[in-house]
Amino acid sequence: MRRRARERLPAALGKRSTRGVAASWPKYVLLALAFFAVSFSAGGQAGAGSELLAKLRKGGFVLFVRHLNTNPDQADTDPLHLENVQAQRQLSDEGRDRAKALGEALRKLKIPVERVLASKFKRAEDTAQLLALGPVETSLDLTEGGLVVSPRENQRRAAVLKALLSEPREAGTNLVIVSHRPVLQEAAGKELGDLAEGEVAIFQPRGAGSYKLIERVLVDTWLSLAKAERGPRAPATRADATR
């Protein structure tokens, strides 16, 4: 952010180069301008975050979470047998810690969650459990098929996810889906093919097979929003409310 602010600094001073203008300014003036640019940018992001949180707290959205960080030295060597967990790519220690932190942030931000669905791959199921947003239901329909299932089966699974993304939710509730990037890409388009591990794609269902992607939020952004949140923590899930 600071680098971007510095890049914008010459433009704020006019079209003349920094050699002709900025270089003649005292250092404390340049530092003050840079600080103002950073503060203004941060304020804009905070405002956008507040608007998003207000929407999510009212409910009616689908939060698609890509599983958290995995071990890059592992691969899925037996994807036809999902019970063979040892042959799957697993969450790393960092991934497990970040899954817990993400769940804590979502609870602190008071985002209501009624239902949590997950892929049957262990890394997705573990992510969903570590989020601790409520009971987790695993489904083959949300599991990455890849090249080991037929194109027709991949299309069927994509159709199931599309239906979940477009089905209207009750007010005051949100659906959380923990799955894989290829699953979302197949259902919602190639532009989501760069979804990072732990990134959350937020959809607004519109019914009749229609939905709108309203935001993509990285884990660190959720953590920053939660850190800035003030006030007592309130239950964010039905499971919390019954404890």
Image: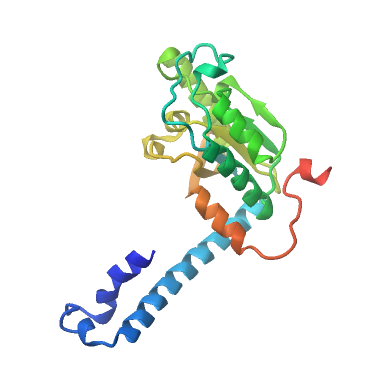
Is residue 218 something one can see in this rendering? yes
Residue 78 position within the rendered picture, expressed as x and y whole percent measured from the top left? 48, 13
Position of the N terminus, as image quadrant, is: bottom left
* Residue 209 in the figure: left or right of residue 55: left
Residue at image coords 33%, 65%: 3
Residue 71 position within the rendered picture, expressed as x and y whole percent measured from the top left? 46, 31
* Residue 17 in the figure: left or right of residue 174: left
Question: Which is more toward the observer, 48 or 123?
Answer: 123
Question: Which is more toward the observer, 146 or 94?
Answer: 94
Position of the C terminus, as image quadrant, is: top right
Q: How is the image coloured?
A: rainbow
Residue 47 position within the rendered picture, expressed as x and y whole percent measured from the top left? 53, 66
Residue at image coords 43%, 22%: 75
- Image height of 203 relative to 109, above or below: above
Is residue 168 something one can see in this rendering? no
Quarter assignment of residue 181? top left
- Image height of 239 relative to 52, above or below: above
Q: Say how many tags the image has.
A: 0
Residue at image coords 52%, 65%: 46
Residue at image coords 47%, 19%: 145
* Residue 27 in the figure: left or right of residue 179: left
Quarter assignment of residue 5? bottom left
Residue 24 position within the rendered picture, expressed as x and y whole percent measured from the top left? 21, 87
Question: Which is more toward the observer, 53 or 13?
Answer: 13
- Image height of 17 relative to 98, above or below: below
